[in-house]
Amino acid sequence: MSYQYHLLDHPADIRLEVEANSLEELFLGAVEGMALILYSDFKNLQNNKKIIKQKINLSSLNQETLLIDFLNKILTLSDIERAVFPVATIQKLTDNKIEAEITGYPVERFDKEIKAVTYHQLKIEKTKEKMLKTTILFDI
């Protein structure tokens, strides 16, 4: 896999910049980046014996709204299950539909509480290097 993400802090929100080779990798980077915000030590959760799996099937207007709807669905499941979902396996992804299975691990508490993943100024762009890039705003 080839994607990168960076957190950009602000008092009322967190911005996550994701850059990837493909739309699928962009979604995977965003999922992992959101997990990092929720629980900074999420990689050590993979040793946890309890695993939670959930299937997600969504349709949206376009790539941007699909990405935000997908992340908000994962965020809702995180709150319900009190778990962090850093792993997604995407079975199908088009410009407006996604079928995926997410894998998560229970946590005692989140490092940061995310109120919502917002649509604010969201745009998926192609860079000069033909990578896909976006910045996602998380309301905290």
Image (cartoon, rainbow, N blue to C red):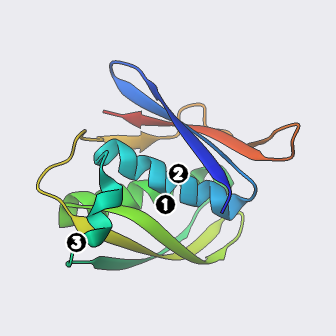
- The residue located at (25%, 38%) in the rendering is 112
Task: Work out whether residue 66 can be spotted.
Answer: no
- Residue linked to disc 1: 70
Task: Give x and y (percent) for residue 27.
Answer: 58, 58
Mark 3–mark 1 Cα distance, whole angstroms, equals: 24 Å
Left of 112 or right of it: where is 86? right
Q: Residue furthest left?
A: 108
Picture coordinates of residue 39, whole percent (x, y): 28, 48
Q: Nearer the viewer, residue 91 or 37?
A: 37
Say which of 96 and 38 sits in front: 38
Relative side of 119 to 35, left or right: right
Q: Label 2 belongs to which residue?
A: 30
- In front of the other: label 3 or label 1? 3
Indicate the secondary structure of the residue bearing disc 2.
Answer: helix
Q: Are marks 2 and 1 in contact (CB under 8 Å)?
A: yes
Q: Residue at horizontal 29%, vertical 40%?
A: 115
Q: Say which quarter of the image contains residue 106.
A: bottom left
Location of mark 3 (residue)? 48
Q: Nearer the viewer, mark 3 or mark 2?
A: 3
Q: Amino acid at mark 2?
A: Ala
Quarter of the image with the C terminus is: top left
Amino acid at circle 3? Asn
- Residue type at mark 1 is Phe
Q: Are marks 3 and 2 in contact (CB under 8 Å)?
A: no
